[in-house]
Amino acid sequence: MDCSGKVVTVDKEIANVRVRQDACDQCRSCVLYPRKTKGNVVVRALNTHGAEVGDEVSLSVSGRKVIWASAVLFLIPLCGLLSGYFIGAYLVSLAVSWSPEALGVIFAFTFLAISYYPVRLLGKRTSFEFVIDSIAPTGVEPPGLADDHKS
């Protein structure tokens, strides 16, 4: 799964690359990134080719990493929600005289909130989803980014 973008900052082996959200119709993995500006998103990429600020680059992401990220993002909180409900409704309700359903809901949302901590930790690990594959020749704009300079 490939897309292209423009390098906006470089810090050693990590480059922040501005990618147009509609440029990656196949995987759409950059849609999950929070740093959006005017239809673009800034993604972190492993800078394997020594790209510099302003370079037009081609990025790639493996399908396996996209599926792994989706599983982490959705399955861990779902497991937290379900396990919290069952712990609250069945285990804690034996010791407390509250309604089992009320305890289940309280514990479900508590465990859901707690479950985002491992998601955050896994999201910060050093394995990057995006890797810079190549640097475009000078003067060649990736599709969709040429319009940004005219406004």
Image (cartoon, grey):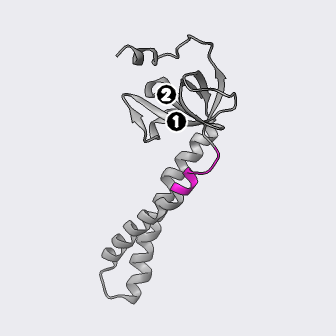
Q: Give the camera-side residue of 14 and 118.
A: 14
Q: Count all numbered tags in the image, as a single digit.
A: 2
Residue beneath the point at 34% across and 79% down:
100
* Residue 10 location, quadrant: top right
Q: In this figure, which residue is indicated by the disc labeled 2?
A: 19
Q: Give the camera-side residue of 122 and 57.
A: 57
Looking at the image, residue 103 sits to the left or right of residue 135; the answer is left
Dividing the image into 4 quarters, which one contains the C terminus?
A: top left
- The amino acid sitting under disc 1 is Val
Q: Circle 1 — which element?
A: strand
Residue beneath the point at 46% across and 19% down:
145
Q: Is residue 131 above or below residue 149?
A: below
Q: Position of residue 27 (x, y in %)?
A: 53, 32
Dividing the image into 4 quarters, which one contains the N terminus?
A: top right
Q: Which residues are magenta?
A: 120-127
Alpha carbon distance from label 1 to label 2: 7 Å
Residue beneath the point at 39% across and 72% down:
107
Q: Position of residue 127 (x, y in %)?
A: 64, 45
Q: Circle 2 — which element?
A: strand
Q: Is residue 88 above or below residue 54?
A: below
Q: Alpha-carbon neighbours of circle 2 within 10 Å: few (<14), some, or many (≥20)?
A: many
Q: Are marks 1 and 2 in contact (CB under 8 Å)?
A: yes
Residue beneath the point at 36% across and 28% down:
38
